[in-house]
Image (spheres, rainbow, N blue to C red):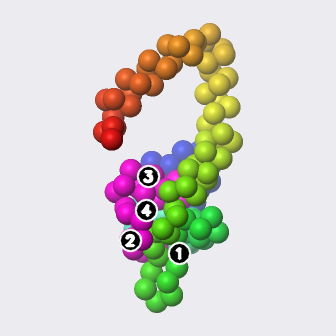
């Protein structure tokens, strides 16, 4: 995984886990990849993944079943949307809005670009 300069790496890992759930690559109630395996896959220290999992537990997105592993909470979708929206509004939207203003872009044009992006990149239900 290519990490950005901000936010912190553990938050980016938490966002990755959330994205897997939102994209339905990982299902509600399912066991998720272990801390050690995710650390190896992402080439980070296991403590960093532990911190991400701790954050997701605090947000009640995942639950730890001692001795078995981590599982996706049944109510994870709504909690993920709240968490990811907070992160987006705090970290990404200000830069995006600044660029829209500086480049004198029109929201009508952005809407068309967004709709084309969704159509080209995501299956609609």
- Measured in 3D between alpha carbons, the distance from the residue under mark 1 to the one under mark 2, in whole angstroms, is 10 Å
Which stretch is magenta?
A: 14-38
Q: Name the residue that disc number 3 marks.
A: 22
Q: Name the residue that disc number 2 marks.
A: 30
Q: Secondary structure at mark 2?
A: loop
The front one of 68 and 3 is 68
Is tag 1's residue or tag 2's residue first in the polypeptide sequence?
2
Picture quadrant where residue 102 is located = top right
- Measured in 3D between alpha carbons, the distance from the residue under mark 4 to the one under mark 2, in whole angstroms, is 24 Å
The disc label shown at residue 63, or none? 1
Q: Are marks 3 and 4 in contact (CB under 8 Å)?
A: no
Q: Is residue 88 visible?
A: yes
Check disc 3: other Cα within 10 Å, few if <14, some if 14-19, many if 20+: some
Q: Are marks 4 and 2 in contact (CB under 8 Å)?
A: no
Q: Are marks 2 and 3 in contact (CB under 8 Å)?
A: no
Residue projecting furthest to the front: 125
Q: Secondary structure at mark 3?
A: helix
Is tag 3's residue or tag 4's residue first in the polypeptide sequence?
3
């Amino acid at each position: 995984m290519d990490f950005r300069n901000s936010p912190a790496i553990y938050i980016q890992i938490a966002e990755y886990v959330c994205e897997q759930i939102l994209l339905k690559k990982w299902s509600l109630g399912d066991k998720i990849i272990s801390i050690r395996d995710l650390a190896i896959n992402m080439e980070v220290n296991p403590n960093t993944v532990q911190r991400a999992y701790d954050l997701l537990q605090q947000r009640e997105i995942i639950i730890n079943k001692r001795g078995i592993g981590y599982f996706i909470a049944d109510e994870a979708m709504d909690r993920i949307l709240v968490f990811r929206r907070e992160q987006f509004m705090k970290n990404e939207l200000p830069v995006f809005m600044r660029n829209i203003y500086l480049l004198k872009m029109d929201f009508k044009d952005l809407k068309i670009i967004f709709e084309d992006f969704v159509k080209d990149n995501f299956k609609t239900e």
